[in-house]
Image (spheres, rainbow, N blue to C red):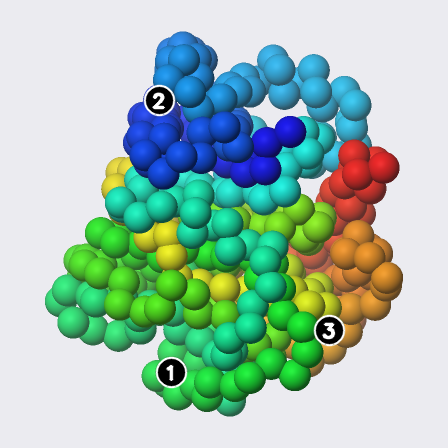
């Protein structure tokens, strides 16, 4: 079985996989890497031939079209029904294929994340390994990874999903030695060209990430969090059950909630790994984000409910949730019960009743996901 499983979903022809093949070949990782490309209803049929071409070049690449996904989904019908089409959460199907095929390290990318030249697999290979260095610790509880990017024009920016109540502060971290064993459980690489920021930031003016100037790994203490997305992010296999990309598209007043499935997933993971050896790391590998075409005002509409709810969501996880259970899957199930109760009793007064329905559906999807992971892991 191969150790490194790359997963991406696309509605285009994902030419990025040719660049991944070149990088992985250059650094000698072809024999230990496989790629899963998860299609959707809008994905062009030519994607299958493109994936085969990359396989012929030595990077084993599997295209999961909708028919193949439907066949696979019959094994887990309850969970499969929760994953909408035309939605980034289709990548969850790729995650589970990787788990079924014995991956050690899941690497999630987007179809517009191109390797920037450093050893893509080699840098992600830190995931799952012990860390003996210092940890980043912020008194505020949050670290802005975008401060480690050289931005033009020079201005303070924050990653998509960073709490708004903390956006009037700069990093002021301590470098502390860990008090117990540390394992890098998740690694989130940074970006040049287009940083992963929210629509509000983009509407305020064009920005470009010119360079990452931080260390190879910024490992956070478990009391310090930062947004984790599905662009250029690797997860150790034991933590895959905590990395459900939350299904989006739920109808709420004024539209629906979108573009926060990966952000909430990353925060759920950081809440679940507390008091375990696992920590989150940021830094290399760096990818060039050649962002697909977007309408910033449409993105703003889709991000509206995520922006309104995330600060409340973070306060809930950090202040009220204490993970319990001997395994990661047990902790996910405990979190599901917690979220269901919070949706009934702890929502802000200004929330319409549909938000409770969304939180309840998310909690139920976590149960289905955890049970599928348990079934696969045996």
The answer to whether residue 135 is above or below residue 235 is below
Residue under circle 3?
A: 275
Instruction: Estimate the x, y position of residue 91 in percent, counting from the top left.
Output: 55, 36
Instruction: Estimate the x, y position of residue 342 in percent, counting from the top left.
Output: 75, 67
Q: CA distance from mark 2 to mark 3?
A: 42 Å
Residue 301 or residue 180, whichever sits in front = 180
Residue plotted at (42% across, 20% down): 58
As helix, strand or loop, the secondary structure at mark 1 comes to loop
Residue plotted at (72% across, 68% down): 276
Give the quadrant of the C terminus. Answer: top right
Residue under circle 2?
A: 13
Residue 287 or residue 313, whichever sits in front = 287
As helix, strand or loop, the secondary structure at mark 2 comes to loop
Q: CA distance from mark 1 to mark 3?
A: 24 Å
Q: Is residue 345 left or right of residue 13?
A: right
Residue under circle 1?
A: 171
Residue 262 in sight in this render: no
Q: Earlier in the sequence, mark 1 or mark 2?
A: 2
Residue plotted at (26% across, 58% down): 202
Q: Is residue 323 left or right of residue 19?
A: right
Residue 122 or residue 266, whichever sits in front = 122
Badge 3 local density, few (<14 within 10 Å), some, or many (20+)?
few
């Amino acid at each position: 079985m191969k150790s490194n499983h790359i997963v991406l979903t696309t509605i285009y022809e994902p030419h990025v996989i040719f660049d991944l093949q070149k990088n992985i070949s250059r650094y000698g990782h072809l024999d230990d890497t496989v790629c899963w490309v998860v299609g959707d209803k809008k994905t062009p049929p030519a994607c299958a031939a493109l994936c085969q071409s990359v396989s012929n070049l030595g990077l084993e690449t599997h295209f999961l079209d909708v028919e193949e996904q439907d066949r696979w989904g019959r094994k887990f019908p309850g969970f499969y029904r929760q994953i909408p089409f035309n939605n980034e959460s289709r990548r969850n199907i790729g995650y589970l294929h990787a788990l079924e095929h014995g991956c050690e390290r899941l690497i999630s990318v987007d179809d517009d994340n191109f390797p920037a030249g450093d050893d893509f697999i080699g840098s992600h290979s830190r995931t799952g390994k012990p860390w003996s260095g210092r940890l980043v610790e912020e008194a505020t509880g949050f670290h802005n990874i975008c401060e480690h990017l050289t931005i033009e024009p020079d201005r303070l920016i924050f990653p998509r999903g960073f709490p708004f109540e903390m956006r009037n502060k700069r990093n002021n971290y301590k470098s502390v030695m860990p008090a117990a064993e540390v394992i890098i459980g998740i690694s989130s690489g940074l970006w040049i060209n287009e940083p992963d920021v929210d629509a509000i930031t983009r509407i305020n003016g064009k920005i470009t990430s010119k360079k990452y100037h931080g260390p190879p790994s910024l490992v956070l203490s478990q009391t310090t969090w930062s947004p984790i997305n599905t662009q250029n992010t690797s997860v150790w296999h034991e933590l895959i059950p905590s990395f459900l990309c939350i299904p989006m598209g739920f109808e709420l007043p004024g539209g629906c909630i979108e573009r926060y499935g990966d952000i909430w997933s990353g925060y759920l993971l950081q809440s679940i790994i507390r008091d375990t050896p696992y920590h989150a790391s940021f830094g290399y590998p760096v990818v060039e984000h050649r962002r697909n075409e977007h309408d910033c005002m449409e993105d703003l509409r889709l991000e509206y409910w995520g922006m309104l709810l995330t600060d409340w969501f973070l306060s809930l996880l950090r202040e009220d949730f204490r993970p319990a259970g001997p395994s990661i899957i047990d902790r996910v199930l405990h979190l599901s019960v917690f979220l269901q109760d919070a949706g009934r009793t702890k929502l802000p007064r200004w929330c319409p009743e549909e938000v409770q329905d969304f939180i309840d559906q998310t909690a139920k999807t976590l149960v289905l996901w955890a049970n599928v992971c348990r079934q696969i892991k045996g």
